[in-house]
Amino acid sequence: MRITILTVPECPNVPVLRERIAEALDGRAAVIELIELIELIEVSAESDAARWGMTGSPTVLLDGIDPFPIPGAPPSVSCRLYRDAEGRTDGAPSVQALREAFSGARRPQAADEQDCCETDPLDPLDPIGRSGRGRRAPAERGLRMVQQAILRHFAATGRAPDAALLEPVAAEAGRTAGEVLAELDHEDFLTLDASGRIEAAYPFSAGETRHQVQLANGVSVWSMCAIDALGISAMLGQDVTVSSTDPVDAQPVTVSFANGSATWEPAEAVVFVGRREGEGPAAAVCCDALNFFTGQASAEQWQLAHPEVRGEIVSQACATRIGQQTFGPLLQDG
């Protein structure tokens, strides 16, 4: 389960919400590092509120979905009020309401969301989102500064930066680039080869993959998987074109992002979201099992041929939402 809090800067209700989330989780081990468990996204503009599905501050998302929807509520950066079982208003959901949401009792499902990935003991999304901790590196120890420098270099050049280019950034935190890169690798924000060179910095790959993304600035980049490719437009805030192939018949699948909307070709295309058993970085456990398919039949054929991969076929809307929620925050300030 991925927990996201959408908030305006310095919202006074966020600390209360964090405490109630911890209580609702009944002291589970993950709560010991609560700041790692919850992805906090600051939103200042209504356009960003619309993109994230924020209807007031704070808004809670569970796996990218608001468990407390207000029918007809517009995107908003104003304060949000919640009602408890007695009808009283408060600035955050009650502990009981959060418990019900975490148990799935209050999780809504629209028609186009019914095939979206559900949490199970082998959640395919765990490696993608680092088991709910998110893909944006912590600000401490220079991790986020270096991660963002790497991602911006990929977006500007299509290539991974050498460690030497990252030394000035790491030095701001009193560390060497090698030290920061090693920690980012250990925490699966990126992967290094045996010589310490960057092989991947999610969502980008330094080497050729099945998924190529053409950026608005003319640069072409490779992404690690289908979900990564679908998150690049939101991460960079620009129009992109994703070009991939169906692993069954090598037929092309294209997704064009323009002005916040995605156009898929063929229109029947779907995405398979899966992973292998065992632990390890996303690059090893699931990236080659997250692919575009020209349609349901092709995806089912691939799934039957790969019984070692656990997962499911998801709709275009679901796959796009996962990509945007996972990678959209990576280059945000704060």
Image (cartoon, helix red, strand yellow):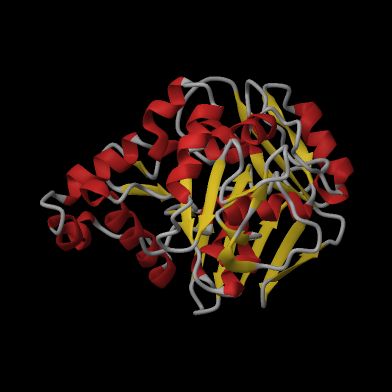
The quarter of the displayed image where residue 263 is located: bottom right
Residue visible at 31% across and 42% down in the picture: 184
Instruction: Identify which residue, 212 or 230, lies in the foreground.
Output: 230
Q: Is residue 216 visible?
A: yes
Location of the C terminus (image quadrant): bottom left
Residue visible at 51% across and 78% down in the picture: 218
Q: Report the side of 196 relative to 131 (left or right).
A: left
Image coordinates of residue 236 in percent, x first then y, are 50, 68
Please, is residue 297 above or below residue 156 in the view? above
Image coordinates of residue 100 in percent, x first then y, are 69, 30
Image coordinates of residue 42 in percent, x first then y, are 46, 61
Residue visible at 44% across and 21% down in the picture: 29
Image coordinates of residue 201 in percent, x first then y, are 41, 50
Q: Is residue 223 visible?
A: no
Instruction: Identify which residue, 87 or 183, lies in the foreground.
Output: 87
Instruction: Identify which residue, 202 or 75, lies in the foreground.
Output: 75
What is the total number of numbered labels drawn onto the structure image?
0
The quarter of the displayed image where residue 164 is located: bottom left
Q: Report the side of 76 relative to 85 (left or right).
A: left
Residue visible at 58% across and 61% down in the picture: 212
Location of the N terminus (image quadrant): top right
